[in-house]
Image: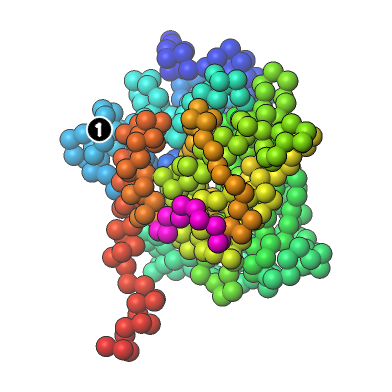
């Protein structure tokens, strides 16, 4: 009998060989269970866990899932009318909570060191007809990487991720704590903050840092450094540069891994940009990126000796593309209401689309120069909750547009908070409207994807606007 993968020709010869090798490992008894996961519209991992004997079959048959998973906002509420004709989408196959199929990408296989005899594999998603799922985000980055390759470029990115870890005092699992969303846990600090990069602060949380280091390296992630950040219970990890799709695959696995490992040891890890805790500092996701020659690995952003600019002409055009599309791509880098609390002047976070030479106040920080193989652009606009496939794809496509249009980024901003430049969106609603009206992103991602993402975010904004906040209660309850 022809399998789903064979019928629709979903694997190349390398993937077929990799799947055969995995099947042999599943047969050997090395694993008891295998987690099949796909990154959803928010960059969260969803999926099913199969016993090893069933996992072997599922490599070729795929794993059925419900299409309602693509209809959910961040509260996991379904915000499309899936049980009406058409299901609220403009293409067939989504109505009535119909099935879609997850198909493993064997190249992504990992062993989860914290879980007993457990393997993990990342999946791509397809309609039951074998057509790629139109709402999946991983293919968007894959297409962007192929577009760059067609022009003779390999996309390289390195991750620099801030997050917070707290000690759990109460998991809040009382009967009244359930809901969409449920009550978050009560937590306490692991560090007071504001002793940035001090060795004493690091040593006091060495148990946590050693836990993360050992598990992330056992997982095979290219970890470079572990750091104490500025804010209370705030930390930062950096990772070595990787090509193509891999940085995004690493990011979805990284976030899930940290949360799982921490939870098993009585901690609560969060990638929320700005939690409501006293003296908080916002967390960002700084994305380091460059283009290389795929033939010899040469960094194409390195300028010639004696050049006036810190990047090659190609790199300067790429930089200008990022600058040009900063506002209409803001939703991809900063997809939550909370993330826009971070954009404020004099805060080590950007508030406008400026660039600067080694300047942490600029949105785009240019590092390196003649002879430096690590020459790159660091975009400081992202929050750590961003869907990495949307974030990286938007960066690459914006940069390629800058190259194609031969855009000029203008002079370096030595005082970024005083430099005239386009302001970044101040709210999620501003970012949604900028994306919805963007001809460029409709051409790149298609109307279906743009309208879909905007609809989900507008549902979240609507829920937020209907909630009575603590600010309102404090402001008006006694006054009027």
Residue 196 quadrant? bottom right
**Residue 378 to residue 428: above or below:** above
Q: Can I make out residue 281 in this image?
A: yes
Q: Is residue 390 left or right of residue 129?
A: right
Q: Residue at x 23, y 39 (%)?
A: 88
Dominant SS of magenta comes to: loop
Q: Which residue is most to the top? A: 1
**Residue 385 visible, this angle:** no
Above-or-below relation of 102 to 84: above
Residue name at image x 31 percent, y 60 percent: 463
Residue 400, x across and y down, in percent: 52, 30
The relative height of residue 283 versus residue 149 in the rendered view (above or below) is below
Residue topped by disc 1 = 90
Whether 14 is among the magenta residues is: no
Q: Work out which quarter of the rendered image holds the C terminus and state it.
A: bottom left
Disc 1 is placed on an element classified as: loop
Residue 416 % position (x, y): 58, 57
Report whether 344 appears left or right of 161. Answer: left
Of residues 198 and 395, which is closer to you in this image?
395
Q: Classify 10 Å Cα crowding around label 1: few (below 14), some (14-19), many (20 and above).
A: few
Q: Which region is colored magenta?
A: 417-427
Q: Name the quadrant containing residue 444.
A: top left
* Residue sitting nearer the eye, 390 or 381: 381
* Quarter of the image with the N terminus in it: top left
> Where is residue 123 shown, x and y percent of the image?
51, 30
Residue at x-position 53% and y-position 23%: 146
Question: As rendered, which of 58 and 213 lies closer to the eye?
Answer: 213
> Quick check: 293 left or right of 1?
right
Query: Is 425 within the magenta?
Result: yes
The residue at the point 31 percent across, 85 percent down is 477
Q: Is residue 190 above or below residue 3?
A: below
């Amino acid at each position: 009998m022809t399998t789903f993968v064979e019928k629709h020709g979903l694997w190349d010869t390398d993937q077929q060989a990799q799947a055969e090798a995995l099947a042999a490992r599943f047969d050997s008894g090395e694993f008891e269970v295998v987690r099949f996961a796909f990154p959803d519209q928010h960059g969260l991992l969803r999926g099913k866990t199969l016993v090893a004997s069933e996992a072997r079959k599922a490599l070729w048959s795929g794993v059925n899932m419900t299409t309602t998973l693509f209809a959910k906002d961040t509260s996991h509420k379904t915000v499309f009318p899936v049980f009406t004709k058409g299901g609220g989408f403009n293409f067939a196959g989504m109505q009535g909570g119909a099935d879609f199929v997850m198909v493993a990408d064997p190249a992504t296989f990992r062993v989860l060191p914290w879980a007993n005899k457990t393997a993990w594999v990342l999946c791509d998603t397809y309609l039951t007809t074998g057509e790629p799922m139109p709402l999946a985000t991983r293919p968007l980055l894959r297409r962007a990487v192929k577009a760059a390759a067609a022009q003779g470029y390999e996309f390289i990115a390195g991750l620099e991720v801030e997050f917070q870890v707290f000690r759990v005092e109460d998991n809040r699992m009382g009967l009244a704590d359930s809901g969409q969303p449920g009550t978050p846990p009560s937590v306490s600090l692991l560090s007071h903050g504001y002793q940035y990069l001090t060795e004493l602060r690091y040593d006091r949380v060495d148990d946590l840092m050693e836990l993360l280091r050992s598990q992330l390296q056992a997982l095979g992630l290219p970890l470079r450094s572990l750091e104490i950040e500025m804010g209370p219970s705030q930390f930062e990890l950096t990772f070595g540069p990787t090509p193509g799709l891999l940085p995004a695959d690493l990011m979805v696995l990284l976030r899930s891994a940290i949360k799982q490992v921490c939870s098993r040891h009585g901690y609560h890890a969060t990638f929320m940009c700005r939690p409501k805790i006293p003296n908080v500092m916002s967390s960002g996701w700084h994305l380091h990126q460059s283009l290389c020659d795929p033939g010899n690995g040469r960094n194409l952003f390195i300028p010639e000796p004696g050049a006036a600019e810190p990047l090659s002409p190609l790199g300067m055009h790429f930089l200008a593309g990022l600058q040009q599309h900063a506002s209409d791509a803001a939703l991809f880098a900063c997809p939550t209401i909370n993330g826009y609390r971070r954009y404020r002047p004099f805060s080590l976070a950007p508030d406008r689309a400026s660039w600067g030479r080694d300047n942490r106040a600029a949105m785009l920080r240019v590092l390196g120069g003649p002879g430096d193989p690590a020459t790159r652009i660091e975009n400081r606009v992202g929050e750590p909750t961003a869907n990495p496939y949307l974030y990286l794809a938007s960066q690459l496509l914006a940069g390629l547009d800058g190259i194609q249009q031969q855009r000029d980024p203008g002079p370096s901003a030595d005082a970024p908070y005083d430099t005239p430049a386009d302001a970044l969106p101040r709210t999620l609603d501003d970012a949604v409207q900028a994306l919805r009206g963007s001809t460029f992103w409709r051409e790149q991602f298609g109307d279906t994807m743009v309208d879909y993402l905007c609809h989900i975010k507008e549902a979240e904004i609507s829920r937020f606007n209907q909630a009575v906040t603590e600010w309102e209660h404090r402001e008006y309850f006694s006054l009027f």
